[in-house]
């Protein structure tokens, strides 16, 4: 039974969720689910988003499942109430919350927690103590008032805006105030206005299949709650796009996409399976990955993505119990051989009798290829990475929309520059300065937004062109393909090392680079000679490299 797969995962995680919570009633942090804060005391503020775990706990309390020891357990309800009370206590006077640092005034933290605690509220069906219920409704309306006047300012993130829309619709239902419903439509309108004609929802200026599975859930839930028919058509376009990026080994997405994520959130596809053949096909194709973790799932993510993914399994489970679940015939993407090009996304897929090849054109020709018959990764190629003599890193893998690209049925050509980038982490002195800023000037919201925009520019967008260029030609045939690279430039005297590497990323993205099993097998079809450092003395005259990858 499909539903049992999700339920088994939820049951396995129940003790872990409770282990995250401070369950000591006299503790000043009673109800806090940020264990790093209350137990280890390694951080100096509680991250609000950990309270999203209350949705899973409320499901366990409210749902009469066979062997569910938590069903209507008074002690569990006491802990859940403590979690609601803690959420209200850490809310700022204006109605917002922090996620990453103090005085962040985070739209994500405000939207996601309001949404999941509202869902928990409905699951509990009036069982919260009266005082907790009253304070929660007041805090929820404060969060809604804050969302009325605030937006995501540091980038366009469809999944954040979708969560804000769904949260506001819940606040409208609970409060009865029409202004919240109107604001929820504002966020929906923004998402739909930015949805590509190719079907994808924008994430930091590009398409990212992993994040799209997440954002699609909030839109599917909004559709259930509101009946907004525009979302049915929008999600169908989304599923048509996403279906192409389900890999033969059960993984999804990766380094060729805008945010490098490979996480699979199943709920939207289970929820829409009765109405959409594409959603039905994705749900069925990816179901084995929920158990095997071929795609990033509950056993892969860290605590920062743990609760939204666990809650997603709840909605997938509940969708599977419906009488009409998966009544639409499954509709896979076209199974015929050929090339599918998404020029707005900068993505390309080639399907032949022997393999599926995925290419990130806007990221310098990042490649993944899978043997279709054996269902395994046979080639992963994230481009070139090196180190300058001054210690800076540089790479051919950079998200760049304005690249010379030529696409034909049997050859793809991508050109572009190498860019410098940094893999930055805090040291004690930089962290001290950052926190001092948070606690002084960062208290002012407009300065805080400036800081977040600055961090995004530094960690995601900032680039510095190196006088080094790559032309990549990929020639495709039914049973093999060739990767021919030409690297040329005058920056050789600045370079300490330059390598071809199968897997790496160049931008900050906390939700990327979780382990998937195919990480163990990347590049297995590539000769070891291609892995050694390149001779940078040849760059000015042009350095040519070629790899042939065969299937069968």
Image: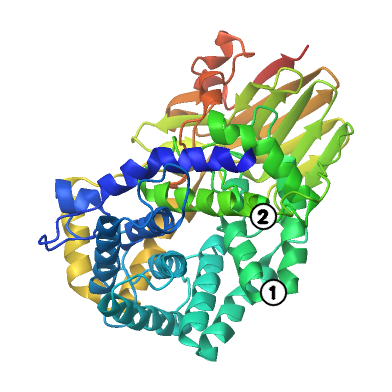
Residue identified by numbered label 1: 227
Residue 422 image point, x, y percent: 39, 43
Residue 311 image point, x, y percent: 47, 53
Q: Is residue 418 visible?
A: no
332 lies left or right of 461? right
Q: Which mark is residue 437?
A: none
Toward which corner of the image does residue 458 lie, by quadrant? bottom left
Q: Vertical placement of 52 versus 535: above or below?
A: below
Q: Vertical placement of 401 versus 177: above or below?
A: above
Q: Which residue: 38% across, 56% down?
A: 61
Residue 426 image point, x, y percent: 25, 47
Q: Which mark is residue 322?
A: 2
Tag 1's secondary structure?
A: loop
133 lies left or right of 227? left
151 and 373: which is toward the camera: 373
Mark 2 surroundings: few (<14), some (14-19) or many (≥20) residues within 10 A: few
88 and 47: which is toward the camera: 88
Q: CA distance from mark 2 to mark 1?
A: 18 Å
Residue 437 image point, x, y percent: 21, 66
Tag 2's secondary structure?
A: loop
Mark nearer the N terminus (2 vs 1): 1
Q: Which residue: 47% across, 79% down?
A: 171
């Amino acid at each position: 039974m499909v539903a049992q797969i999700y339920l088994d995962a939820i049951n396995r995680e129940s003790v872990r969720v409770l282990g995250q919570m401070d369950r000591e009633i006299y503790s000043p942090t009673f109800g806090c689910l940020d264990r790093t804060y209350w137990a280890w005391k390694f951080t100096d503020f509680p991250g609000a988003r950990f309270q999203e775990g209350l949705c899973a706990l409320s499901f366990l309390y409210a749902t009469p499942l066979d062997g569910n020891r938590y069903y209507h357990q008074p002690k569990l309800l006491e802990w859940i109430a403590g979690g609601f009370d803690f959420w209200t206590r850490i809310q700022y006077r204006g109605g917002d919350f922090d996620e990453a640092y103090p005085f962040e005034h985070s739209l994500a933290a405000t939207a996601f927690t309001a949404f999941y605690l509202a869902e928990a509220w409905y699951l509990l069906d009036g069982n919260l103590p009266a005082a907790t219920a009253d304070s929660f409704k007041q805090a929820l309306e404060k969060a809604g008032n804050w969302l009325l006047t605030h937006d995501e300012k540091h980038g366009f993130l469809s999944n954040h805006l979708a969560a804000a829309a769904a949260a506001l619709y819940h606040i409208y239902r609970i409060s009865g105030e029409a202004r919240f419903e109107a604001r929820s439509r504002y966020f929906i309108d923004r998402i739909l206005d930015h949805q590509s004609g190719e079907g994808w929802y924008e994430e930091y200026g590009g398409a990212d299949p992993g994040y799209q599975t997440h954002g699609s859930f909030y839109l599917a839930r909004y559709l259930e709650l509101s009946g907004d028919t525009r979302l049915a058509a929008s999600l169908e376009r989304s599923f048509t796009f996403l279906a192409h990026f389900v890999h033969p080994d059960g993984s999804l997405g990766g380094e060729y996409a805008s945010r490098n994520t490979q996480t699979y959130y199943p709920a939207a596809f289970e929820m829409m399976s009765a109405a959409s053949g594409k959603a039905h096909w994705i749900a069925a194709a990816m179901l084995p990955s929920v158990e095997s973790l071929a795609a990033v799932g509950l056993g892969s993510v860290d605590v920062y993505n743990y609760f939204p993914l666990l809650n997603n399994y709840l909605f997938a489970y509940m969708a599977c119990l419906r009488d009409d679940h998966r009544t639409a015939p499954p509709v896979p993407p076209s199974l015929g051989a050929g090339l599918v090009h998404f020029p707005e996304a900068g993505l390309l897929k080639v399907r032949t009798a022997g393999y599926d090849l995925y290419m990130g054109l806007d990221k310098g020709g990042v490649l993944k290829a899978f043997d279709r018959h054996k269902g395994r990764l046979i080639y992963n190629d994230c481009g070139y990475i090196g180190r300058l003599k001054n210690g800076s890193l540089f790479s051919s893998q950079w998200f760049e929309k304005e690249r010379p690209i030529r696409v034909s049925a049997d050859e793809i050509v991508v050109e572009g520059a190498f860019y410098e980038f940094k893999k930055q982490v805090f040291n004690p002195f930089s962290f001290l300065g950052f926190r001092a800023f948070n606690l002084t000037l960062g208290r002012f919201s407009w300065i805080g937004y400036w800081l977040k925009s600055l961090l995004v520019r530094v960690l995601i967008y900032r680039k510095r062109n190196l006088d080094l260029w790559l032309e990549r030609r990929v020639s495709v045939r039914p049973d093999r393909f060739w990767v021919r690279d030409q690297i040329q430039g005058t920056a050789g005297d600045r370079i300490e090392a330059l390598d071809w590497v199968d897997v790496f990323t160049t931008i900050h993205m906390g939700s990327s680079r979780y382990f998937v099993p195919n990480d163990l097998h990347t590049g297995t079809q590539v000769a070891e000679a291609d892995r050694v450092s390149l001779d940078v003395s040849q760059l000015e005259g042009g350095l040519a490299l070629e790899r042939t990858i065969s299937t069968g």
